[in-house]
Image (cartoon, grey):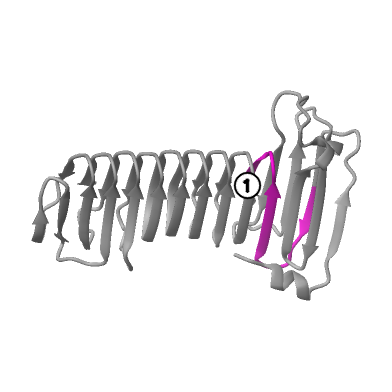
Amino acid sequence: MRYSSVLATVAVLITAVSAAAQSNWDKTYNVSGRAAVQVSVDNASVITRTCGTCRTVRIHVDAHGNDLSRWHLTEMQGGNVVHFTMKRRDEERFFMGWQGRSPEVFVDLPTESDVELRSGNGGLQLTGVHGSVDVKTGNGSVGVEDVTGALRITSGNGALTVRRVEGTLMAVSGNGPMTLEGRLSQFEVRSGNGGMNIVLEPGTTLTSSSRATTGHGGMHLTVPRDLKAELDLTTGNGSLHSDLPMMSQSTSDRHHLHGNINGGGPSLRLTSGNGSVTIRSN
């Protein structure tokens, strides 16, 4: 999700926020249609929640007693696009005297919104959005719940937890476990090092090829009994387990299992370089 071309063609108001001698900052933006919200921070957590059919976007910063003048805050609005950044000033990047917790940024927005969140070092939480979602953190956990739409998640180091989502999902973690639950029409998830627990809830229908891959860790996939798919399970070092009746089974050995379930459908591949792979029905 990129809005640079949009922002370049609309009249915008850019404000370098003065945050001297305070530890909180707050602003509300009025929107007339579908909101597009971008938040980028370098060392803070972001918590995003929905306010239903409201026509506002509210951003609140809580530095938990730290002086916000040590950060450079920039906010910008162009039409229904809201952009907010919070970066430590150059002279403060190596300052070791922070008090207690790192800052938190709270975002309240309409349910029908497109969201882009970025954090260099901090957790990201998102709840209740219907739209395009793109979240990325260099180091920190990611939690997403009750989201409908196209979802993309990236974490360099941290656990990913996704619950009650509908739509498509792309998720990448360099290091950390994944818990993914929802009704997905297509997904592609990868972890360099970490186990996966994926639950495709009843009502799931795959519309295109999907896959899950981990370099190191066990994988557990739960699917509806009526899911139609061409199943392929592979492990470099580990065991394979399945309680699904395989039709037209073409390959079955200790490290590879391939066949159709419920007559076949889009390809569904699970691969672990080092770990057991288990698939079962719910």
Pick the front one: 275 or 58: 275
In x, y percent, where is residue 120? 64, 44
Q: Which residue: 17% across, 43% down? A: 241
Q: Is residue 251 magenta?
A: no
In the rendered image, the vertical position of residue 110 relative to residue 157, given as above or below: below
Give the residue furthest to the bottom: 9
Provide the residue designation for mark 1.
Answer: 48
The part of the image, by quadrant, that contains residue 97 is top right
Q: Which residue: 67% across, 58% down? A: 37
Badge 1 element: strand
Pick the front one: 194 or 248: 194
Query: Bounds of the magenta span?
Result: 27-49
Q: Is residue 50 visible?
A: no
Q: Is residue 40 magenta?
A: yes
Assess disc 1: are there few (<14), some (14-19) or many (≥20) residues with their C-alpha within 10 Å of its C-alpha: many
Q: Which residue: 18% across, 66% down? A: 264
Which quadrant would the N terminus be assigned to in this image?
bottom right
Q: Main secondary structure of the magenta part?
A: strand
In the rendered image, the vertical position of residue 122 relative to residue 248, given as above or below: above
Amino acid of disc 1: Thr
In x, y percent, where is residue 248? 8, 63
In x, y percent, where is residue 75? 80, 54
The part of the image, by quadrant, that contains residue 168 is bottom left
Q: Is residue 239 shown left or right of residue 202?
A: left
Q: Which residue: 84% across, 38% down? A: 91
Q: Is residue 42 visible?
A: yes
In x, y percent, where is residue 207? 33, 68
